[in-house]
Amino acid sequence: MNNLKNKYGTKALVTGGSSGMGKAFANELAKQGIEPILIARSIDKLKETAKAIFEEHNVKPQIFSVDLSDENAINKFLSEIENQSIGLLIHCAGMENNGSFLKINEGKELQMIKLNVTSTYLLTNHFARKMAKIKKGGILLVSSMAGLMATPYFSNYAATKSYVHNLGLSLYPELKMHNVDISVLAPGLTETNMVADNGIDWSKLPMKSMKPSEVALIALNNLGKKGTIIPGFMNKMMVFMAKRVFSIKGFSKMNGWMIRKAISNNKI
Ligand SMILES: NC(=O)c1ccc[n+]([C@@H]2O[C@H](COP(=O)([O-])OP(=O)(O)OC[C@H]3O[C@@H](n4cnc5c(N)ncnc54)[C@H](OP(=O)(O)O)[C@@H]3O)[C@@H](O)[C@H]2O)c1
């Protein structure tokens, strides 16, 4: 097991820390005696999560309501926490749009680019520089299996997650030179609010869902050891098929055919 406290210190920033995987990361960190600093938009959900973490682990998380799709809000937040020594960044906040590319609202797609891409650049850049200076730190970016393969009807989402994956993987050797770990988590279907009611009938797709807590633990144990962390056997198999068994075009067509069967008719 990775000794995170020894490696990265006592404070970790967890974006999207109020629910789903971010909440699972925050819980696991608190269990290991690390103080999580949680970011999300809804202050009520943040308070609720922080209270539950305190009651269970006797560690009091800090909470910040920040809209990470707003560049100015990110910069304001970063200056507020400038003097805290944060040794670990877990950038988990993200949003997902699905449906025909020709139908999805342009504003929603642009917001997704700002949240999934721009905030990833800004936070990674900020913390990589600070961590490299003191030659200590860890960064975990949350991509998606969709970022590793063509995913029709999730096209713009998949593209944003490809950015996240490629940024992290490219930085892996670059930051190692400065003793900073970076890894990218590429989860498959995970039981969170994001996929609870998003117009996809997941039972029609060959995917086995995982619990956020198991995904978080796998990710934390592999941080700095692997560039890309794919949790779960079925997910690894799917990536293997997409990259090694099928041609890129062949897989893209097959994935499109499968998703078309699972997505609500009114979305395509
Ligand atoms: N669930 C899956 O099957 C799956 C699979 C692959 C990858 N992922 C990725 O995993 C990550 C976590 O998602 P999840 O499944 O845990 O979803 P979730 O339960 O919906 O959690 C999303 C978190 O992000 C926060 N958030 C959303 N928009 C935000 C914004 N503009 N500014 C700040 N915080 C924001 C949410 O809080 P507020 O709404 O209060 O802001 C919440 O805390 C995402 O990056 C997602 O793309 C999920």
Image (cartoon, rainbow, N blue to C red):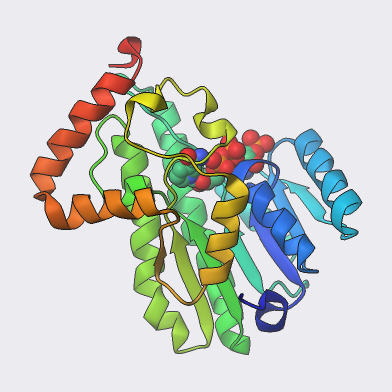
Residue ID at (31%, 11%): 265
Which residue corresponds to the image point at 53% horizontal and 62% vertical from the top-left?
219
Pick out the residue farthest to the top: 266
Could you tell whether 175 is left or right of 5 in the image? left
Numbered-mark total = 0
Residue 58 is situated, as x and y percent measured from the top left of the image, at 91, 59
Which residue is nearer to you in this view: 154 or 167? 154
Residue 114: tell me if it is visible.
no
Classify residue 199 as left or right of residue 74: left
Picture layout, residue 161 above or below residue 88: above
Q: Is residue 124 visible?
A: yes
* Image coordinates for residue 64, horizontal then vertical, percent: 76, 49
Q: Quadrant of residue 226?
A: bottom left
In this view of the protein, which residue sits in the foreground, 232 or 227?
A: 232
Q: Is residue 76 above or below residue 33?
A: above
Residue beneath the point at 82% across and 51% down = 53
Say if 15 sits above or below 101 in the image: below
| Quadrant where the image shows the C terminus | top left
Q: Is residue 40 left or right of residue 104?
A: right
Left or right, 36 with reference to 237: right
Which quadrant of the figure contains the N terminus?
bottom right
Q: Position of residue 116 (x, y in %)?
A: 46, 47
- Residue 178 x, y percent position in the rendering: 50, 88
Quarter of the rendered structure image containing ligand 1: top right
Residue located 45% across and 38% down the image: 112
